[in-house]
Amino acid sequence: MLLRRIGTGDNNDKGASGNAGNAATPSSNSAPTVREQEQKSVSRFDRTVVEQVSKQDKITYELKGKVQERLVAELERRKISPTEERQVRTITDDIFQEVLLETQGVTLSRAEKSLLLDVILAEILGYGPLEILLRDETVTEVMINGPKSVYVERKGKLVKSEVKFKDDQHLMRIIERIVSPIGRRVDESSPMVDARLPDGSRVNIIIPPLSLIGPVVTIRKFSKKPLTIEDLVRYGSLTTRIADFLRAAVLARMNIVVSGGTGSGKTTLLNVLSGFIPDDERIVTVENAAELQLRQDHVITLESKAANIEGKGEVTIRDLVINCLRMRPDRIVVGECRSGETLDMLQAMNTGHDGSLTTLHANSPKDALSRTETMCLMAGMDLPVRAIREQVASAVNMIVQQERLKDGSRKITSIAEVDGMEGDIIKLQEIFRFEQTGVDENGKIIGQLKPTGVQPRCVEKFEQHNIFLPPDTFGSASQLRAF
C-alpha cells in the first residue's frame, strides 16, 4: 500500500541479512542442500522488497511535504484563504503535478496519485486523517484517545482503527479546525469544549492538562440522511403499531420526554418524533450543540454559547428556553435537559406549549421522574418537593425509554404514561414493555415491545384530535384493563 507503515532502518536490514547469512552457511563437510538454497533465495527477495517499499514510502512522504510546503507559500503569495475550496483544489492539483515531474524515482499508479492528492487536500481543507472515518458510512462514532490510538463504533461494537496522527500538535491543528468555525476555543484555560461538524455530528474535546494521554476527541456521527420512523421499524427498534402510537401522541400534542443512557439513541428518536409535527406549526429548538435535523420549513434553531476568554458572554440552555417563550412557539424542542432549564421547560409545558419534546439521562421511566425533580432543584429556587412533583405530573404526559442493549442494538424498551398525583407520589403506568425472548446464534437479542394490557387515558385525547387506533393496540380484549 502507498501509505502503509513499514519498519525501516538498520534493524530490519540486519535481520534480513542475518537470516540470509544463516541460510547460506553450508555445512563444513557438504554442499548446500536444495532447501538451504531456497531459504537463501527467499531471504534475499524479502530484503529487496523491504528496501524497495521503504524507499517508496520515504519518497512518498517527501513528496507530500514538498506539495504542502509549496501550496502554503502559493496561497500566501496569492492571498487566497484556505476556505476558498475550489481555488485551493485547483492550485494543489497543479503543484502536485509539478512536483511529480521534478521528483526522480517516483512511480505511482493512477490510484496512488489520487489517494496521495486526497490526503494532501484533507490536511489543507479538511480534517486530515479523520476524513476517511467521517466518510465511512458504517462508522457511527469515532473516539480519538491521543494521536496514536483511534477507535470507531461499527454496528454497536468498538473496533480499533488503523488511522493515526503524527503527534499531539498534528491532532491539535485538526481540533482547531473543528472548533474555530463555530466560535468555540480550546486551550489550557478552557480545556473542554462541545462542538459540532458542519453535518451536525456531535464533537466533545478534552485536552491536557485534564487529559493525561494527550488530546481526546469523541465524535458522534449523524447520518447524512436523517433516519425516519420506517428506518427504526426496519432496524427493529420498535414495531409498526408502536410507531403509529407515537405518531398519534405527537399529533395529539402530548408532552413527551425521551429518556435513556449515553449513546442509547435518544437524540435520533427525538429527531424522528419531531418529524411528526405538522408543517403549519412554528417550532423552536434549543440545543447545546445543534444536532436536530427537522425537515419542516418553519423551524428556528437556537444554540447555547460558551463564555469568551474574559469569562463573559455565556448564554445557557436555560437562557434560551426562557427567551424562546417570547418567540411565539407552537412547539418547543429541547435537545437535552441537564440542569435548571428543566424547571423552565416544565413551566413552558404548563403554560400553553403543549406537544413539547425533550430528552434526559435516566435508566427507566421511574428514574426519569426522579431526575426531573433533582434537576428542577438545581434551578436554585427553594421549592418544596411536592410543588415540583405537581409541576412534573401536570406537564409531562409520556416517557419513552430508549436503551442500547448488550448486542449493540438500540431499542425502545418502555413507554409509560404519567397520570397526575396519588398522595405525594406521581402516578406512572407502563403501556408498552420490551420482552426479550432469547439470543440468536450471532449474539443478537430477540424480543419485541409488547402492550401491558393497560388502556391509557391519552386515548381520549387522541380521539379529540380525530385519531383512532386499532382496538387491539394495547392488547387483546380479554387482556385490557382500565388505568
Image (spheres, grey):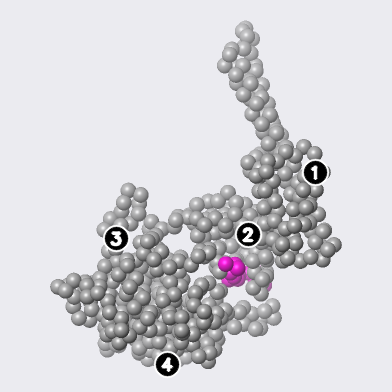
Question: Viewer-nearest of labels 1 and 3?
Answer: 1
Q: Which amino acid does label 3 sit on?
A: Gly
Residue under numbered circle 2: 214
Instruction: Give the crowd class for mark 4: few <14, some 14-19, many >=20 residues within 10 Å.
Output: few
Residue under numbered circle 1: 101
For this orientation, the residue located farthest to the right is 77
Which secondary structure, mark 1? helix
Residue 147 is labelled as: none
Labelled pair 3, 4 in contact (Cβ < 8 Å): no
| Sequence order check, earlier mark of 1 and 4 | 1
Whole-number angstrom distance, CA of label 1 to CA of label 4: 71 Å
Residue depicted at x 65% and y 16%: 25
| Sequence order check, earlier mark of 4 and 2 | 2
Q: Which of 206 and 295 is in front in this view?
A: 295
Vertical arrangement, residue 34 with respect to residue 81, above or below:
above
* Quadrant, the C terminus: bottom left
Q: Would residue 112 be found to the left or right of residue 422 on screen?
A: right
Which secondary structure, mark 4? loop
Residue depicted at x 85% and y 62%: 77
Whole-number angstrom distance, CA of label 1 to CA of label 3: 62 Å
